[in-house]
Amino acid sequence: MPRVFVIAALIFFAVTVSANERERGALRMMEGAEHALGADRFVARGSALVSGPVAGDLFAAGGEVDVVATVGGDAVLAGGRVRLDAAAGQDLYAAGGRVSLNAPLVRNARIAGGSVLIGPRARIGGGASIAAGKVDLLGAVDGYLQVAAGRVFIDAPVAGDVEAIGRTIELGPNARIAGRLRYASRQDLMRHADAQVGGGVERFALDLDLEDKLPVKGFVVALYWVWIAGLMVLGAVLVAALPQHAARIAGDARRRFGWSVLLGFVALVVIPAATVAIAVTGIGVPLALLLVLCYLGLLLVGYVTAGIALGAAALERWSAERAKRTGWRAAAAAAAILLIALFAWVPFLGALVAFVALLVGMGAILLQLRRTLPQP
């Protein structure tokens, strides 16, 4: 564990200490709300509307993300409300408070959100993995379905097996499951008389709480809060040791929130895939191991950076005079990290907030890294 903290501190230092007066020039390309790189398109706005066709992959983030034009490649979307109303030629990766898919998707869907709607005009060509507070499946799935939610409602054809976990699980009159349905719930399956399950129904046990394992539960909770205390200390130390650099990263997280979420999400998905690709070559194993360590450090310091940004914003709003003092900023960072950790315990919504905080912190660090690169 100490090595991870050291790596996190080194990453924080490396991506900030070399930033200088070239910042605006180096970020000119990134500051635009929309940017094309070959056939791919990157969009970050408070309200991100994609109304023109995208030949390659689409990466979009914002308070509201609406895609109403076709996407030739993958669609990677993150926002408070995410809506895909046009066909996508590859996979969908989406995270948000409310996520809706109302168009054909050639391959797989990986979705996390507060509520998820797969509309009647949607058709997922591959498999679907969904985690949310509430899931309504009204569009067909040509592969398997994996879903975990507080409430699961399936009212559409599913060509493969279904595995569902939730407080309530319901099959509507249009449910046509060709494979096997395996489910775990405290309540019995609610099944309409017209719903069909070709492969049979199996209920399996899932330990959703740990009342019968109190010693284990107590140890896990204690370990969690020890970890959070360590993050609070790390945040305070980084602010105290590198006040100007911490302020710069915190400013990016607030002023370029959309870009921070977008870049954080891209890094979360792309870096592990790149690590595997490098490792399978054999000769790239040492580089892959180094990349894994850097990735773990980025995750760690990303979460801490979100707390630093939140603490700085709250302190500046409460008292501009105190916000100029390093000691107060360090204390505010530690308090904000604690606040995020407490809020993470709120069912469903808390996990989403913690996830977005992680993305914002990682993205802000990558924005600082971009500042250190030579201007094209």
Image (cartoon, rainbow, N blue to C red):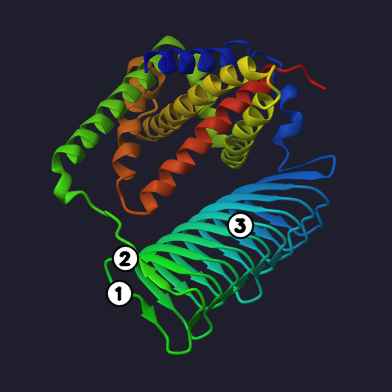
- Would you call the spot at circle 1 few (<14 residues within 10 Å), some (14-19), or many (20 or more)? few
Q: Is residue 125 or residue 320 the one in the foreground? A: 125
Say which residue appears at 47% left-offset and 82% top-offset.
172
Marks 1,2: beta carbons within 8 A: yes
Label 1 and label 3: CA atoms lie apart by: 27 Å
| Residue annotated with mark 2 | 185
Q: Where's residue 173, x and y in %?
A: 49, 86
**Which of the labelled discs sits on residue 188, or is there none?**
1
In the rendered view, would you say 38 is above or below 249?
A: below
Q: Where's residue 284, x and y in %?
A: 68, 19
| Residue annotated with mark 3 | 109
Mark in front: 1 vs 3: 1
Label 3 and label 2: CA atoms lie apart by: 24 Å
Kind of residue indicated by mark 3:
Ala
In the rendered view, would you say 278 is above or below 97?
A: above
In the rendered view, would you say 341 is above or below 137?
A: above
Q: Is residue 117 or residue 293 the one in the foreground? A: 293
Kind of residue indicated by mark 1:
Asp
Kind of residue indicated by mark 2:
Ser
Secondary structure of residue under mark 3 = strand
Say which residue appears at 52% left-offset and 53% top-offset.
96
Query: Image quarter for residue 252?
Result: top right
